[in-house]
Image (cartoon, rainbow, N blue to C red):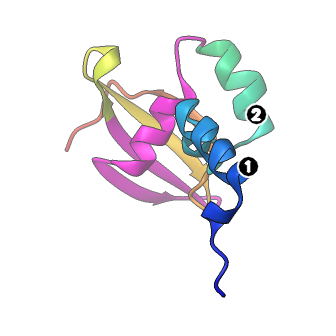
Amino acid sequence: MAISKSDFPQYEKTRAIKQIYGYNRVMEYKFTDYFEKEVMRKRPYLKKEWCIQVLKNPLRVERQENNRFRFWGVIEELEGTILRVITLDDKITIHNAFPDRRFKL
């Protein structure tokens, strides 16, 4: 007899809670201490969800020195501003983010 996740009602409840609160969207990405302590302090208007949105739907991606990557994406909530997000080499650990006023396609 095969066992499935639906055999465990607690699993379904936990999954539903995670979906409601967006837990999976944010938790699959990591943030450096620098991002948490400095970037969020200097740019309190930024949202982690916007950074993740840029990583998932970039306009452009470039490898950068020091084993980092640059991602650019449009954030409609910032009136169409281009947000640049810098990640570590794993492309899921977010290190820095800021509006990029000089971005050109």
Say above or below: 49 vs 47.
below
Residue 10 is situated, as x and y percent measured from the top left of the image, at 73, 49
Q: Residue furthest bottom?
A: 1
Disc 1 to disc 2, C-alpha distance = 36 Å
Q: Is 53 contained in the magenta span?
A: yes
Type of residue at label 2?
Tyr
**The residue tagged with tag 1: helix, strand or loop?**
helix
Type of residue at label 1?
Gln
Residue 16 is situated, as x and y percent measured from the top left of the image, at 58, 41
Q: Is residue 10 left or right of residue 73?
A: right
Q: Is residue 93 left or right of residue 48?
A: right
Image quarter of residue 35: top right
Image quarter of residue 22: top right
**Which label was assigned to residue 24?**
none
Residue 45 is situated, as x and y percent measured from the top left of the image, at 53, 11
| Point 40% across, 50% down: residue | 56
| Point 62% across, 39% down: residue | 18
Q: Is residue 57 left or right of residue 104?
A: right
The residue tagged 1 is 10
Q: In the rendered image, which quarter contains the C terminus?
A: top left
Q: Residues within 10 Å of mark 1 (few under 14, many from 20)?
A: few
Q: Residues within 10 Å of mark 2 (few under 14, many from 20)?
A: few
Q: Is 76 contained in the magenta span?
A: no
Residues at discs 1 and 2 in contact (Cβ within 8 Å)? no
How many circles with numbers are drawn on the protein? 2
Image quarter of residue 33: top right
Q: Earlier in the sequence, mark 1 or mark 2?
A: 1
Say above or below: 48 vs 57.
above
The residue tagged 2 is 34
Q: Which residues are magenta?
A: 44-73
| Point 54% across, 32% down: residue | 20
Q: In the rendered image, which quarter contains the N terminus?
A: bottom right
